[in-house]
Image (cartoon, grey):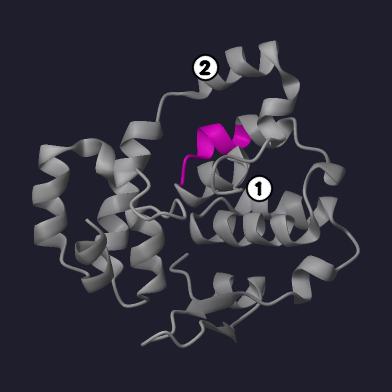
Amino acid sequence: MYQAAIKGDWQAAAVLLQRDPNLASAAITESGDTALHMACRATSRTKVIRELVRRIAEAASGIVELAAVMREKNENLITSPGKNEMKPLYIAASLGNKDMVSYLYKFTRLKDLSITEWFDLLIATIRNNMHDIALDILNKNSDGTLATMRTSIVIPGENDSPDTTKKKGTALHELAVQDI
């Protein structure tokens, strides 16, 4: 699965996913990266990324009720990071699960996320056409910091050279490239 994700070979990935659908969201590296993480690092792998997100979203849909039950048992679960240090709200936004985002967002306080986490959430909601939530995030973080922060992309190094980080656009840039 690792090779298929890095190479952008959707045909190979589809065969593997047909054998084991859990590979769509399973850790495939020692550091816990998923096929989606690896495909995103290989920035031109859009078909693989789209298909992985679609499959993961299908698996994740309809679990708002479970989140409500879990929240009743432990309110901190909503803001507790998972294995990859990502919080449930960000994961739901990245997957485009608006119902889950709407549910989790209601219980997320300003102090629950760092400024970087708020920015990542803002970008995820813009990319997944959750503009109402994106606007609310900007209003909630009213000091203007989120409006001027820039996204960045990590470009994996080759032949044991270090990864490099490239700064990209602001939230407004993300919004400008969308078909609205």
180 or 37, which is in the foreground? Answer: 37
Work out whether 149 lies above or below 102: below
Q: Which mark is residue 133?
A: 1
Task: Rate crowding at label 1 as few (under 14), some (14 to 19) or many (20 or more) other CA atoms within 10 Å.
Answer: some
What's the distance in space between the residues labelled 2 and 1, CA to CA?
20 Å
Is residue 46 left or right of 103 when viewed as pictured?
A: left
The reply to whether dot 2 and dot 1 touch (C-beta < 8 Å) is: no
What residue is shown with label 2? 65
| Quadrant, the N terminus | bottom left
The structure residue drawn at horizontal position 40% and vertical position 31%, both measured from the top left corner, is: 61
Work out whether 82 lies above or below 139: above
Is residue 149 left or right of 65 when viewed as pictured?
A: right
Element assignment for label 2:
helix
105 or 177, which is in the foreground? Answer: 105
Q: Which mark is residue 81?
A: none
Task: Rate crowding at label 2 as few (under 14), some (14 to 19) or many (20 or more) other CA atoms within 10 Å.
Answer: few
Amino acid, disc 1: Ile
Magenta residue check for 99 = yes
In terms of sequence position, does the residue under pointer 2 or pointer 1 come before the other? 2
Element assignment for label 1:
helix
Amino acid, disc 2: Glu
Magenta residue check for 33 = no
Percent x, y of residue 120: 64, 60
Work out whether 67 lies above or below 9: above
Q: Which residues are magenta?
A: 96-102
Is residue 156 left or right of 114 when viewed as pictured?
A: left
* Mark whose residue sits in front, 2 or 1: 2
